[in-house]
Image (tube, grey):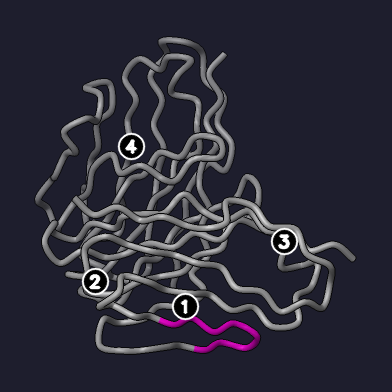
Amino acid sequence: KQEVTQIPAALSVPEGENLVLNCSFTDSAIYNLQWFRQDPGKGLTSLLLIQSSQREQTSGRLNASLDKSSGRSTLYIAASQPGDSATYLCAVHNNNAGNMLTFGGGTRLMVKP
Amino acid sequence: DAMVIQNPRYQVTQFGKPVTLSCSQTLNHNVMYWYQQKSSQAPKLLFHYYDKDFNNEADTPDNFQSRRPNTSFCFLDIRSPGLGDAAMYLCATSAGFYGYTFGSGTRLTVV
């Protein structure tokens, strides 16, 4: 059974810092990995999608990497801003369980002005 | 913009009174999902439709049912809401391996 772990569970940084959020998964048989952002009381917004054949994806100040063989992904946020404060969820799309997503527990990020 | 729309954003219902949450999509995705998310927890899959085929998760309570009358719409019915059913309910869609798209969610309060 796929298990997804996100470290740290919470992170507080001053504005302007570069930061890395970590995601690990136990079963490397995945189609893709997706990073989401969730603001309090809101739905999930997709940030980046990395297919299993890809190593990284970039969007603006965000860069996500994938090392499928070691079961790891990182989300790099450059020059963090207070508006980046949210919960970041990593989810893997398993290829041995139909069309299922397995979520990590999330990292709650606070960027202080 | 193509999107997933959930209505209402906030729903208050009485203990034991049936309630229906709705989801619509303009993406023409063949798979639709309902997730339940409680405070500070990851979303938990309740069930999903692959086209018209309904797939229930083993631990989804019988109190929860779903309907998908066509490709665009999907409904979540809670027959007799209990206090433990208060949560955010998220609808999502997918097609192939192109990632999931989530709606903004419906926050359900049971009084």
Specify the subunit that label 3 lies on: A
Residue farthest along the top direction in this orientation: B16
Question: At x 50% / y 47%, what residue is drawn?
Answer: B105
Q: Main secondary structure of the magenta part?
A: strand
Question: At x 47% / y 57%, what residue is drawn?
Answer: A6
* Above or below for B96 versus B39: below
Q: Nearer the viewer, mark 2 or mark 3?
A: 3
Q: Which residues are magenta?
A: A58-65
Camera-nearest residue between A40 and A103: A103
Q: Please provide percent x and percent y for residue A23.
A: 44, 65
Mark seen at residue A48:
1
Mark seen at residue B76:
4
Residues at marks 2 and 4, CA–CA distance in whole angstroms: 20 Å
Q: Please provide percent x and percent y for residue B57.
A: 19, 38
Number of disc labels: 4
Relative to B61, B5 lies left or right: right
Residues at marks 2 and 1, CA–CA distance in whole angstroms: 16 Å
Camera-nearest residue between B10 and A95: A95
Mark seen at residue A85:
3
* Above or below for B97 versus B84: below
Name the amino acid, label 3. Answer: Ser
Name the amino acid, label 1. Answer: Leu
Camera-nearest residue between B25 and A54: A54
Label 2: which residue?
Answer: B95
Q: Nearer the viewer, mark 1 or mark 4?
A: 1
Specify the subunit that label 4 lies on: B
